[in-house]
Amino acid sequence: MHPDDIAKTAFRTHHGHYEFLVMPFGLSNAPATFQALMNDVLRPYLRRFVLVFFDDILIYSATWAEHLQHISIILGTLRDHQLHLKRSKCSFGASSVTYLGHVILADGVAMDADKVEAVASWPVPRSPRGLRGFLGLAGYYRKFIRDFGVIAVLLTRLLRRDSFAWDDEAGAALQALKGALTTGPVLQMADFSKPFIVDCDASGVGFGAILHQGTGPLAFFSRSFAARHLKLAAYELELIGLVQAVRHWRPYLWGHSFIVRTDHYSLKFLLDQCLSTVPQHQWISKLFGFDFVVEYRPGRLNMVADALSRRDAKHMTLPEGGAGVAACAISGPSFALLDDIRAAVREAADAQALLRCLQDGDLDSPWRLEDGLLLHAARIFVPDFGDLRH
């Protein structure tokens, strides 16, 4: 304790008054003070070859010879400042280490198995508080989970005032998050000598993006759209997803040239086209200062980001082991008008007459039945049913 602050820690016992000479547990400013001390002590070496979080000190090196030298420097610095280490709590020369809930390996970063087990064994929440605790723990690993934001939207809605009502969809979302956590990939380490690539895509549910450098993923990012965005045009939804992904990964992308790949062709000319609305100007302005180019990538080649954004929030059941998720999620848009026409084909008398002629071979070849629709050449036949023709 600083000599001027010792008197502030006085407390009374049946043996009299006592004061702390060293910082005790329980003071609200103790963690921040101790972290500031560790930062000051190790400041010359921070982020060069050492990281520190309170009493967790991580020394990293490229070679064994460098590692021995770095260990010697840190141990000497701690000794000079009268900071002592307990040997049983130290590990030296390890090829992998668990640090702040992550397992750091030579080839990437994985989730801590103990934390994953805690999430997987989490009981069904019975209150908003229990659900909030689950989402807080699961959300710590959201960068490992491809479609976290879209899967969790059903759960986060339950946190609204007087909205907690557990049902089968919420249970499916809970199990989907648990399953995604237990199958999360090992994220690659960033190599800042190589260009970064951001693959992004958006749908009517949300948007998804993946950061990589041409090999394995560095991080995933997905989020459901706010209610005010759901009525926007596809171009604006794609733009919002692109901007939020780039800003989310600012620590990686700022000051480096990178590529943004999208399956929305008009975004290829993002910085050259005339903007028509004030919100578009506002979103574009958030990209100022970033050095990037936009490349068009057809949806069939943009499978990962497309799957992130198009996951159906209403049907949360996942195939076992995650198999087939991309195939289930990547689909074309559905239109209410086409659904109405299909229903009319099944009900309308004129459509049924055409179907019978088609089955009997009495219609010319331009007529055909495709996906529940009657087509003449490339034109859709609209039955005389209700108000469809109006």
Image (cartoon, rainbow, N blue to C red):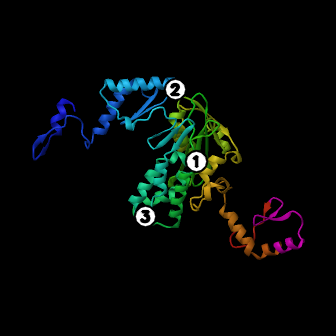
Q: Secondary structure at mark 1?
A: strand
Please state which amino acid type lies under the numbered disc 1. Answer: Gly
Q: Quadrant of the N terminus?
A: top left
Residue at the spot of label 1: 208
Q: Where the C terminus falls, by quadrant? A: bottom right
- From mark 1 to mark 2, how far is it between C-alphas? 40 Å
In the rendering, which numbered label is found on residue 64? 2
User: Is 273 one of the magenta-colored residues?
Assistant: no
* Res. 192 in view: yes
Q: Position of residue 71 (x, y in %)?
A: 43, 26
Between 280 and 163, the one lying in front of the other is 163
Q: Is residue 364 above or below residue 324?
A: below
Mark 3–mark 1 distance (CA, rounded to whole Å): 27 Å
Crowding around mark 1 (Cα neighbors within 10 Å: few <14, some 14 to 19, many 20+) is many
Q: Earlier in the sequence, mark 3 or mark 2?
A: 2
Which residue is more in the foreground, 210 or 218? 218
